[in-house]
Image (spheres, rainbow, N blue to C red):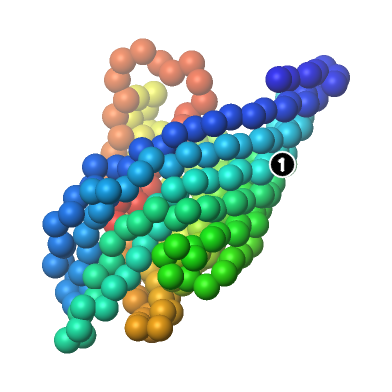
Amino acid sequence: MDYALTQHTTLSLGASRRITRPEPEALNPYIDHEYAPNLNSGNPYLKPQITQSFDLGFEVEQPIMTYQLTGYYRRNTNSVTNVVTYLGSGESLSTLANLPRNDSAGVEFSANGRVQRWLSYGLSGNAFYTQIDATQLGSPGLRSTNGVNLKAKLDFQLTAVDSLQVAIVRTDKRLTAQGSVRAINLLNLGYKRPLTPTLALVATLTDALNGQHFEREVSTPELTQTYQRRATGQVGFLGLVYTFGAKKKTKDAGFEYDLGSAK
C-alpha cells in the first residue's frame, strides 16, 4: 500500500510471503574434488525456503535527488546454509542443509543524486541484524550478528566527453550453522570516452584492491577449521564498445565489471 504524503514524498506498507527454491547445482549430490582436500557437494533433499516479510518504507523523489528508507522484519524457514563434516585423513566435506529458522530485521536504503555538474552518486545498502537457530544441525543455542551490505558509486564527468566511475561493493559477515563467512570488500574502477555517437573507448579494473578473499570459519566438537580461498578477481579490460540499433531513451547503464570469479 502506498500513500502520497506530499508531491515528492511517499509512505508505503507491505507484507509478502515468498517461496525460493534451491538452484539445480545445490541439489547435485555428487562430490566435487576441485578444491581437495576441501570437498564439496549438494543436497538433493533440500527444501524450498519460505520467507514472511513485513516492511514500512519512506521515499523522497526530487529532480536532482531521490532517496528511500525501508524498515523490515523477515522470518525465513528452511534457508540454505553450509555444513562441514570431517572425513578423516585431512579431508573435509562441505555440503548444504536447511536452517530451521533465520530471522532478520533492519533498514534497506538507497540514494541517487547529483552533487555538482561534474559529480553524481548512487548508494544502496542494507543495515541488518540476523539471528539463527541451528540447534537441529548440532549448533548450541541462538546466534546473531549485525552488519551492513553496501553498494556505492561515484561518477565523475572529467571533461565534456570523459567520465570516470569509482564503485565499492561490500558483503558483510554472514552466519552459517557451524560458524561464519567473513566480509568481502571490492573496489572497481571504470573510464569511458565516446569517440563517435556509436563508438566508445572503455577501460575497467575489477577488484582493484584484491578483496575477493573467501574465508569460512567452522567450530564443532569434531572439527575446528579456517578455510581460505583467494579468487583471481583482478581483471583489467581495455577495448572499444560499438552500439548499434535504436538510440536508448534511458540513461546509460554505466560500466559492466567482470565479477564472474567472485563466489
Q: Quadrant of the N terminus?
A: top right
208 to the left or right of 86? right
Depth check, front residue: 40 or 260: 40
Q: Quadrant of residue 197?
A: top left
- SS at circle 1: strand
Residue depicted at x 85% and y 21%: 5
**Residue 172 or 42: which is nearer the viewer?**
42
Amino acid beneath label 1: Gly
Looking at this rendering, what residue extends furthest in the bottom direction? 89
| Residue occupied by mark 1 | 71
Percent position of residue 96, x then y: 32, 58
Image quadrant of residue 207? bottom left
Quadrant where the C terminus lies?
Answer: bottom left
Image x and y of residue 54, in percent: 66, 35
At a point 47% along the width and 53% down the height, the residue shown is: 100
Name the side, left or right, on which 10 lies relative to 141.
right
